[in-house]
Image: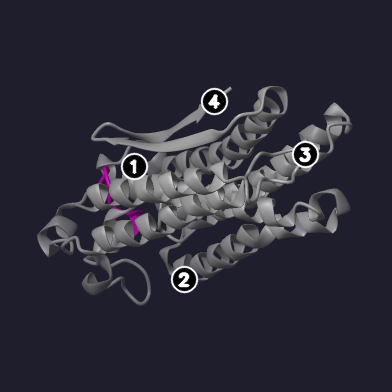
């Protein structure tokens, strides 16, 4: 039901945005990206509503049975991920707090781009494009992460451990079914890699070494957040690795799409339309540029 509502809402907003753009009342003013505010804002708005529906869907799941918790065995976890249990379970709260702050800082990091005067003049389009990017990322998490996969968080395997001991009431929360993949790491990576991509798109004259440095710096915050998510007993190593990859890909690909649309529009003119695609095995966005 949630997916049907998402399709209807996304289709309606996309159709309205295409109609508005065809009136030519406002078009993207950026020389780098084609991101007309009505279209970009409508996609972001649809993503926001879909995110609310996705969170409700996840929160509506039943709690974990106590018998399930008692039946979990650390040795059933693959050897690579099993090293998560080497961390002190008593440090989980401090580690969790660190990851929250790391996420908050990284999510607002793209707004530092406006210190650059070339980017600042396109602040409205870049801001909407970033909101669109984050909304796409959170819905990939909701609908293709724990919305599809049920994996118990590492903390669920630690009943009775620590000082004070981990209590059962902490472990049966249905949130503990959402280990795969890491949303914190994904959203952190979206913020940092979006920042890197936009900065370099506005400064193609920078050297290869500088570009490598920018992307290396972009990888540090999600790597730290991901590591401390494992120390917080929220995720296994593979969960944070996938989360980082998803977030980085989203943060780079969405600006890349808008940049290609600008190139095509400059070359051919015409209009661009968007149509959501959602099937049981696939979710995406169909983009058509009329020449």
Residue 78 counted in the magenta span: no
Residue at horizontal 65%, vertical 44%?
193
Direction left: furthest residue:
67
1 or 4: tag closer to the N-terminus: 1
Packing grade of label 4 (10 A; few <14, some 14-19, many >=20) is few
The residues tagged by marks 4 and 3 sit, at their Cα atoms, a distance apart of 19 Å
The relative height of residue 162 versus residue 45 in the rendered view (above or below) is: below
Report which residue position mark 2 lands on. Answer: 93
Percent position (x, y) of residue 52?
Answer: 35, 62
Q: Look at the image and tell me whether residue 274 can be seen.
A: yes
Report which residue position mark 1 lands on. Answer: 144
Report which residue position mark 3 lands on. Answer: 31
Q: Which stretch is magenta?
A: 144-159
Q: What kind of element bears circle 3?
A: loop
In contact (CB < 8 Å): disc 3 and disc 2: no
Percent position (x, y) of residue 75?
Answer: 27, 42
Q: Nearer the viewer, mark 3 or mark 1?
A: 3
């Amino acid at each position: 039901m949630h997916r049907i509502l998402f399709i209807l809402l996304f289709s309606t907003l996309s159709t309205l945005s295409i109609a508005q753009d065809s009136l030519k009342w406002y078009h993207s003013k950026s020389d780098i990206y084609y991101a007309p505010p009505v279209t970009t804002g409508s996609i972001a708005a649809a993503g926001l509503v879909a995110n609310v529906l996705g969170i409700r869907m996840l929160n509506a799941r039943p709690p974990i049975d106590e018998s399930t918790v008692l039946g979990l065995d650390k040795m059933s976890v693959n050897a690579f991920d099993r090293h998560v249990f080497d961390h002190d379970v008593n440090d989980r709260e401090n580690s969790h707090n660190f990851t929250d702050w790391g996420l908050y800082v990284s999510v607002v990091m793209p707004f530092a781009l406006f210190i650059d005067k070339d980017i600042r003049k396109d602040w409205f389009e870049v801001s909407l494009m970033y909101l669109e990017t984050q909304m796409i990322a959170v819905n990939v998490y909701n609908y293709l992460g724990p919305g599809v996969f049920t994996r118990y968080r590492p903390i669920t395997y630690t009943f009775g451990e620590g000082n004070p001991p981990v209590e059962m009431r902490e472990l049966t929360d249905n949130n503990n079914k959402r280990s795969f993949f890491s949303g914190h790491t994904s959203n952190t990576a979206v913020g940092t890699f979006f920042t890197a991509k936009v900065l370099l798109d506005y400064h193609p004259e920078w050297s290869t070494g500088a570009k490598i440095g920018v992307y290396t710096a972009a990888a540090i915050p999600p790597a730290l957040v991901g590591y401390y998510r494992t120390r917080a007993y929220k995720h296994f190593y593979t969960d944070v690795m996938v989360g980082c990859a998803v977030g980085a890909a989203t943060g780079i690909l969405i600006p890349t799409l808008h940049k290609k649309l600008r190139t095509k529009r400059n070359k051919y003119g015409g209009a661009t339309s968007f149509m959501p695609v959602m099937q049981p095995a696939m979710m995406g966005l169909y983009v058509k540029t009329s020449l």
